[in-house]
Image: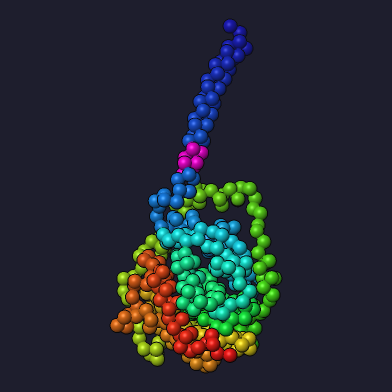
Amino acid sequence: MQPAEGWSRGFSRWWWRTGWVRRSLRIRLTGIGVGFVAAVVLLEVLLRIPSCPMPRSLRTALFQCYSSEYADENIHFESAKLFINLPKPGVDHLCSWNGYVWHHHGDALGYRNPESPAQADVVLLGDSMTYGHGVEETSTAAHFLREELDRTVVNLGWTGDSPIQYLARLRNYALPLHPRVVIVFFFENDLDDILLDRTPDEIRKFVATGEAREATVHPRAELSVEYRPRSPFIGAAIGEHLLSLRALRFVATRRPGPDDAPSPEDFVVVPPLDEEVPLQRGEHLAIDYLDAATSMMARSARDAGTHIVFTTIPALDTGRLLQLLRQRVHVAARAAGVPFFDLVGKFAVDGRVQREFFLPYDGHLNEAGHRRVARAVAEFIRETKLLDAP
């Protein structure tokens, strides 16, 4: 046999063997790929079944509708004009958080109202407690207050709001509705939110001069058209809309958080309204902003011929913050010459806030809590005759 012939046969045998290996490898890789795709499809189908059991934290990550990394599914966007979150107009979305599921319907301006009235008798401002986080719209304080008063009540509450947003929404959304009464519901984390949303220099400038983006007034039509749906690349769009990929990402990056722990079992003790609360580091700056913002809100409402009322929503935990805010809002209302009523006391029995008005594992108001808020507000409005006064 010639050397060339031996080399040729050896090469042929090697090529046949490596070809078989390649074919075998391709078959195995194809099988793995098909199996992975089938698993993803099955997981996708299971995750989209409403009754599919899963941890609360995973359901929150997949189906929340605000503060989400999947921007297209948020029900709000950040306004460049006001530097606050504004609702997306006319959005319908199924929201989930901490095991609670509710339907969000945005009116023409994006707020959670069944209709889009051009005028209102009463407007509500506040954060997620006022918005109605965790419950349907028909279980919110705004809904029950419409029934109590038989008047037009508009809910401008929004998740994550603080005095920064209350000021902006009052001047840009509430007062253009020419309401007779505006109720501002402050919540215990408002002071912390001020320090998170604005820098110390921005706070000092507003306190000294009254100048801030949230203090500016714009035509509502200009604010509503700020939102422009984005068009992500097809790969990014697929990654955002596939629940299976979101779930895998959540598992890979998951860290234990407050959603994994139940609400505290302790009741908040409600001390006397005039009991002093010592300040902690940085809180004096937030209180300065609170005083300046409430003063501007009172002036703006007065100039518009609107009665404005300040109150505080009760909470189950962090009693020091609740008492501090309750006390400071009372002082601010007195300084601004506007009414204040103690809503926290309406939720207390023997000086303790009761759990029966709150969602377990969450701390937001349940239907009974919203009904209690509406009843207390309606009683205050009737007693003070704010809707009847000229």
Q: Going 50% across and 61% down the picture, which residue do you hit?
A: 103
Specify the quadrant of the image occupied by residue 229.
Answer: bottom right
Q: x, y (%) of residue 317? A: 37, 75
Task: Give the residue at the far front of this rendering.
Answer: 150
Count of number-bearing discs:
0
Given residues 25 and 375, the one toward you in this image is 375
Model colouring: rainbow
Q: Position of residue 329 (x, y in %)?
A: 48, 86
Q: Quadrant of residue 368?
A: bottom left
Q: Residue at x 42, y 73 (%)?
A: 371
- Viewer-side residue, 19 vs 389: 389
Quadrant including the N terminus? top right
The x and y percentages for residue 142 are 49, 73
Identify whether 252 is placed above or below 1: below
Q: Which residues are magenta?
A: 37-43
User: For the view shown, which residue lies furthest in the left direction?
Assistant: 350
Is there any visible trace of residue 352 in the rendered image?
yes
Q: Main secondary structure of the magenta part?
A: helix
Q: Name the residue: 41% across, 59% down.
A: 99
Q: Nearer the viewer, residue 318 or 300?
A: 300
- The residue lying toward the viewer, choosing from 174 and 319, is 174
Residue located at (58% from left, 16% from top): 12
Tell me residue 20's x, y (percent): 53, 22
Q: Is residue 319 magenta?
A: no
Residue 284 versus residue 155 in the image, above or below: below
- Where is the C terminus found, in terms of image quarters? bottom right
Whether residue 299 is situated above or below residue 162 in the rendered picture: below
Q: Is residue 87 visible?
A: no
